[in-house]
Amino acid sequence: MTINTDVVIVGAGPVGLFQVFELGLLGIKAHLIDALEQPGGQCIELYPDKPIYDIPALPVCTGKELTDNLLRQIEPFHAEFHLGQEVSQVRALDADRFEVIGSKGTTFHTRAVIVAAGLGAFQPRRVALAGADAFEGKQLHYAVRKPEQFRDQDLVILGGGDSALDWVLALQPIARSVVLVHRSNDFRAAPASVSKMRALVDGQQMQLLIGNVSALKSADGQLTGVDVQCSDGVTRSLDFHHLLAFYGLSPKLGPIAEWGLGIERNQIVVDPEKFQSSTPGIYAVGDINTYPGKKKLILCGFHEAALAAFAIKARLNPGEKVHLQYTTTSPIMHKRLGVTSPQMEAV
């Protein structure tokens, strides 16, 4: 089945979500497609619980809070999400329409495409040992979706960044045992998290090994343990029920590089008036784009989304003047937002 829509937004991070809002205010329908399994982009995958201080009018919020607020903000526009798939192909059907095909076969016919893919499609850095991929999603995990599945289990957690330490602290109270393995005694995580982890180690509530995983052990189709080459030269074996690896996420431009757009250092070159790429009808906002003076900030992405929305409105309605209206006073904006217009009384 082919989905017909005004706009396809590639990327459901904060800027992609706010793009839905800006398009919605102008009466434009959007579908979103993202390689991740949930909206939020880097905010959800990398720092859902870490504070963000530079969002206007929000002195502080977490990545998850920002995502949740944006999802609530775009509810009136009924955007449709297509998650867990990359865009594998984009081609022009004619001068006014594009065909966008997702990696799961989802096909869109759209009049404009907005790339809001952040730094690209994020993929976890995987355990580089033979046979590891056979256990992914079973006993080898690169993300935690259901913490309860690890209750009363023996866990080995790999990594030294925020994600690794956050899950060590979250799972230690419910797991039967936790061993953290990191290549050095220097951690990239928040100092408070590192201090809490070391206190658990000192209290013999978990273990810490400094070294590198050198081999996987399995029996009867089950992953049973790992060998760790420790910094003291001794190889130690660890048995477990689950292995959780948090080596970080690797951004890859992926199929976007094959779309025939102007690319500079893995970023899409755009004009800073419309945020249109070298291909008319394809736009880019957020960290994925570049132009003179570009700053990789969420608030800059929000600004870009607003201007891109007006440019797309003009593309969809050539020759029609696009009037700037304010959500404070415009009855049209209030109708689209589903709110009651305030009674304007003369003073």
Image (cartoon, rainbow, N blue to C red):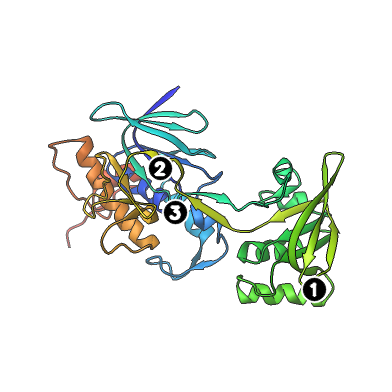
Q: Along the line of sight, which residue is nearer the eye, 133 or 243?
A: 133
Figure quadrant of the C terminus: bottom left
Residue occupied by mark 1: 232
Q: Residues within 10 Å of mark 3 (few under 14, many from 20)?
A: some
Q: Residue 127 appears at what percent x and percent y?
A: 68, 52
Q: Residue at x 35, y 57 (%)?
A: 301
Q: Quadrant of residue 171?
A: bottom right
- Distance of label 3 from label 2 (alpha carbons): 11 Å
Q: Residue at x 45, y 47 (%)?
A: 12
Q: Residues within 10 Å of mark 1 (few under 14, many from 20)?
A: few
Q: Are marks 3 and 2 in contact (CB under 8 Å)?
A: no
Residue 256 is tagged as 2
Which amino acid type is marked by label 2?
Answer: Ile
Q: Residue at x 24, y 53 (%)?
A: 326
Residue 119 is tagged as 3
Q: Residue 126 appears at what percent x and percent y?
A: 64, 51
Q: Quadrant of residue 312?
A: top left
Residue 50 is tagged as none
Q: On the picture, is 226 further left or further right than 332?
A: right
Which amino acid type is marked by label 3?
Answer: Leu
Q: Nearer the viewer, mark 1 or mark 3?
A: 1
Q: Along the line of sight, which residue is nearer the eye, 39 or 124?
A: 124
